Amino acid sequence: MNVRHIISIGVLLAAFVAAFGATYQVGESEQAIITQFGDPVGAPVTEPGLHFKVPFVQRVNTFEKRFLEWDGNPNQVPTRDKRFIWVETYARWRIVDPLLFFQRLRDERGAQSRLDDILDGEMRNAVARYNLIELVRSTNREADDVLVEGEEEEAILNVIEKGREQISGEILARASTRTADLGIELLDLRIKRIIYVDEVQQDVFARMIAERRRIAALFRSEGEGEAARIQGERARELQRIQSEAFRTAEELRGNADAKATDIYAGAYGRDADFYAFTRSLESYEKVMDAETMFILGTDSEFLKYLERVR
């Protein structure tokens, strides 16, 4: 192999390396910044496909287009009512301006570090502005359902003005104003977990027990009131039925007595002596039973009736 062939092969290799170094590919989920000696050159490349650059001089810096995660570390924070709690938060974000992102943060590691400062700081500030109950509940629904007369003053202390969801939204809004000049858009932020320190945990348990007992007492009181109402209605209904039955019985008894009187009157009109005899028997029936011994004199009217019959 002579020198000319060696030179030709070297030129071809150099051309191949130069051609390879002059192209780069951007994926569907990527965007790129071209730098030359460390400084950005040109506009960000956001379209996927094959692109060109100056070989050996320019460098491709790619960034994600997709949503990225941020998970905060647990932080011990005091609330406005001086309760110390551990708070964990998480967020989702994306790079919307890769050039600004590169100029301010360089890469995702720098972004995560900056987000730690911004999001943890805003979370601490927000927690310090609210009482503990605002951070663990989102609505007043349960409290509203169990309010009874005489408890309004106690309930005022537990009324939620914003709640956990709105406080999370407040943190997101405040943090978004600080990340806008970093080429970052915050998509969502949530309080993932709240862990009580031992002192607060015991206090929370005591409050929960007291609240459950109060609700149970309310339900028992309502149940007793409902039972008294049902018993009262039952007593009134029973009295009504008894009154109607008594009235009906009296009407029947009156009708029967009238009928009997008519019968007696008719019997008296047909046979006065037999009527008197029958009435005497009824009188004896009312005052005597099977064990009664009844002694009659010879001048007894009853014996007179028997003598007449004989």
Image: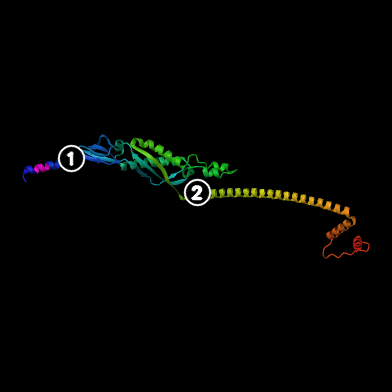
Query: N-terminal of the two: label 1 or label 2?
Result: 1
The residue closer to the viewer here, 161 or 27, is 27
- Asked which quadrant contains residue 309, the reply is bottom right
Secondary structure under tag 1 reads: helix
| Closer to the camera in the image, 267 or 84 | 267
Furthest toward the front, the residue is 270
Residue 189 placement (x, y as % from top left): 40, 42
Q: Is residue 140 magenta?
A: no
Mark-to-mark CA distance, 1 and 2 = 69 Å
In this picture, is 219 found above or below 167?
A: below
Across and down, in percent, residue 28 comes to: 29, 41
Mark 1 vs 2: CB contact within 8 A:
no
Q: Which residues are magenta?
A: 6-10
- Residue 305 lies, with reference to residue 144, above or below; the image says below
Residue 212, percent across and down? Answer: 54, 49
Left/right placement of residue 299 relative to residue 149 reads right
Q: Which residue is mark 1?
A: 19
Q: Nearer the viewer, mark 1 or mark 2?
A: 1
User: Which image quadrant: the C terminus?
Assistant: bottom right
Residue at position x 46%, y 51% in the image: 198
Q: Residue at x 52, y 43 (%)?
A: 141
How was the colour assigned to the protein in this rendering?
Answer: rainbow
Three-letter amino acid code at disc 1? Ala
Residue annotated with mark 2: 204
Residue 9 lies in the magenta-colored region? yes
**Residue 63 percent location from the top left of the image:** 29, 41
Under tag 2, what secondary structure? helix
Residue type, numbered disc 2:
Val
Please tell me which residue is depicted at 37% across the width and 39% down the height of the picture.
186
Residue at the image position 75 percent from the left and 50 percent from the top: 248
How many residues crowd mark 2 within 10 Å: few (<14), some (14–19), many (20+)?
A: some
